[in-house]
Image (spheres, coloured by chain):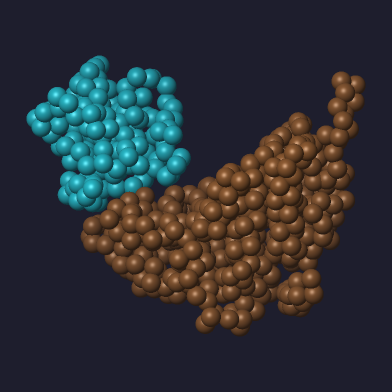
Chain colours: A cyan, B brown
Amino acid sequence: MPELQDLYQQIILDHNKNPRNYRELPNATRKVEGYNPLCGDHYTVFLELDGETIKEIAFTGNGCAISKASASVMSTTVKGKTREEAERYFDTFHRLVTGDRTGLSTDELGRLAAFSGVSEFPARVKCASLAWHTLRTALENEAKEVVTTE
Amino acid sequence: MSAAKQSAGRRAQSAEVGVGAVGLRSALSALPSEYDVARIRGDFPILSRNVRGKQLVYLDNAATTQKPQAVIDRIVRYYTEENSNVHRGVHYLSEVATAAYESARTTVKNFIHARDEKEIVFTRGTTEGINLVAQSWGRTNVGTGDEVVITAIEHHSNIVPWQLLCAEKKATLRIAPVNDAGDVILDEFRALLNDRTKIVAIGHASNALGTINPIKQMIAMAHDAGAVVIVDGAQGVPHLPIDAQDLGCEFYAFSGHKVYAPTGIGVLYGKEAILDAMPPWQGGGDMILSVTFEKTTYNALPYKFEAGTPNIEGVIGLATALDYVSGVGIEAIAAHEHDLERYATRRLLEVEGLTIIGTAKAKASVISFTLEGVHPHDIGTILDQEGIAIRTGHHCAQPIMLRFNIPATGRASFGMYNTREEADVLVSGLKKVIEVFR
């Protein structure tokens, strides 16, 4: 049976309470909204790209602890990384929360490992993924737009 | 019959304070001490199961209710002994199925005190009933510049069909606002009504806030303006005695699954004269008298609105559920639920940081709440680990969430089989939520 403390790990509770990079980016080159109409989670991800590198990343918005902590951890993970590296983190994270952990090493996971409990709670996978899908859209498109996970 | 008239008279006497409130009050003086909740729980097999290793505490009755063994058995008996198509065959099984189907219509008619079986149209649920009225009555009677009035606490299913109609007909949708308690501001509602108002669509009780609207009074106001009224009774029928004739509305729609019957079956009540004048909505078998490629003659009421093979098991299950509710007594159920709502509200307010959204004068047993610093979705997951089922989210009523400036709420909704002890379990669960997030 899935345990609550697997889902609400200390890192998640901490990032929910004190989200990192939780602000608007005045010099953002990309700005994309992510929205989950089912539960009302709503975030905006701001990126400042310098060539292929994510020079700055920030986010605003509100939602459940899982979605907010995920956005926060994501921002600290991909800051200073290239697009390609960020895409790799997206895949890693997606596999982690959907329970496909084959070949994922602890090193590779880093702080993302805190979300390993999510796969035991199918109803919460979308919460954890919302910010990541929003980031991916921001990296792929120059146009500002709204992403939903429904 | 005389008993029905008597109760209608009793409610009519104090109509000014609203049908819901009166129903509850008169019910309170009825027989709360004789309410045998343990026996009722025994009739609902699912309530004794464990969920996540804990005893199930089912507090999501505004989403759907559990089914008594009588309903489950009746459906099994239908498929074991009676299954056949209705209104078609000359053979024995078709006669049996048709008799059961039509006798269910009489049960519904009696339950909501309609005048005639012709006024009972079986639908898939409340949503389909409202869409039927918007499409059939609405497209015939609403034109450019006309107005449709709803309230700010409607479910999406009593908003979107009217938006579709208004967009097609270039009509205007007007919204009666609510105050901070979640009560419709009646003066503002009245002020919206005028000779362009063609139809008023109001919820009997709000699924998101629990507010019981004073619908009898609102129907009278709408009639004064010459408008037709449809009541969304999805949350009314399970909790309040309904007397369609006494209310006077032209239409009343409700769902079976919210009143202990199966999903996929509902009822649209409509006054005979208005249903008769309406064009059919869906075409097909059963709704016609004769078809040639030149001319088709439509069937009489209510069959004109029941195209295709209906949900026969649903109809039969619905009648069984309504019989079960009548056996317990809708007034006794209303009194029991009112007691639970009052008790749970009192206990919930002991929880640190908890705010109840919706404090209307008259409330159904629906309690929406927020917990400071914790998103409702997280509350839902943690309570689920304790075996407690509540709804979290916007409850298909996003405009009302905007009105109160919140993204979502947690919602505990009580049915006839819930107990004060279950409210206590909910409170303990919420204390656990706070511990996790401290």
Residue at 73 percent of width and 42 percent of height: B92
Q: Residue furthest front?
A: B92
Q: Residue furthest left?
A: A107
Q: Is residue A120 above or below residue B346?
A: above
Residue at 83 percent of width and 45 percent of height: B301
* A122 or B192, nearer to the observer: A122
* Viewer can see residue B396: yes
- Left or right for B381, reference B28: left
In the picture, which quadrant includes the N terminus of chain B? bottom right
Can you tell which quarter of the image residue B146 is in? top right
Can you tell which quarter of the image residue A80 is in? top left
Can you tell which quarter of the image residue A100 is in? top left
* Viewer can see residue B227: no
In the picture, which quadrant includes the C terminus of chain B? bottom left
Q: Is residue B32 above or below residue B59?
A: below
- Left or right for B8, reference B340: right
- Left or right for B64, reference B185: left
Residue B159, x across and y down, in percent: 64, 45
Residue at 85 percent of width and 49 percent of height: B274
Residue A51, x across and y down, in percent: 25, 16
Residue B279, x across and y down, in percent: 83, 38
Residue B138, x across and y down, in percent: 78, 41
